[in-house]
Image (spheres, grey):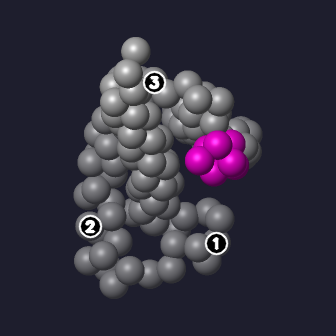
Amino acid sequence: MKILNGTLAVLFFVFTGLQYNDPDPLPWMMAYASVATLCALAAFGGYFKWATIVVTAALGIWMLALLPGVIGWVTDGMPSIVGAMKAETSYIEETREFGGLLIAIMVLLHVLRSAIRKSKESAAQPH
């Protein structure tokens, strides 16, 4: 798990840096840096269950706000979202952002699962 969490931390720190040229970099940099930090801490055995839950919930709410754009993309026949970097319609950008948040949430759920597992192992050990 340490190698996986460390690899995820490095990836999300890279994702954080890549947001610099985004039209709205700050929220994305904060989101990806939060995921990277929680993965890095987990790689070193530091699991912060409540922080992970809070960040996951915040990203989930953000995803829900993008859901109408994803529905518009599906309704329009799911045109390619990777063809050009500049989105031709708003729902293409919203669908891309939704995907990024989905990946981040899946990683956070992995970290949360690891935290719960470690908590159960600690509780099972005699003190």
Number of other residues with Cα within 10 Å of mark 1, as a class: few under 14, some 14 to 19, many 20 or more: few
Q: Secondary structure at mark 1?
A: loop
- Disc 2 marks which residue? 71
Number of other residues with Cα within 10 Å of mark 3, as a class: few under 14, some 14 to 19, many 20 or more: some
Which mark sits nearer the N-terminus, 2 or 3? 3
Camera sees residue 8: no
When asked about the image quadrant of residue 35, the answer is top right
Highlighted range, magenta = 1-7
Residue mark closest to the camera, 3 vs 1: 3
- Disc 3 marks which residue? 48
What number is the disc on residue 107? none
Specify the amino acid type for callout 3: Phe
Q: Secondary structure at mark 3?
A: loop
The overriding secondary structure of the stretch rendered in magenta is: helix
Specify the amino acid type for callout 2: Ile
Q: Is residue 64 above or below residue 94?
A: above
Residue mark closest to the camera, 1 vs 2: 2
Residue 121's spot in the image, x, y percent? 40, 34
In the image, is residue 4 part of the stretch drawn in magenta?
yes
Q: CA distance from mark 1 to mark 2?
A: 20 Å
Residue 64's spot in the image, x, y percent? 27, 48
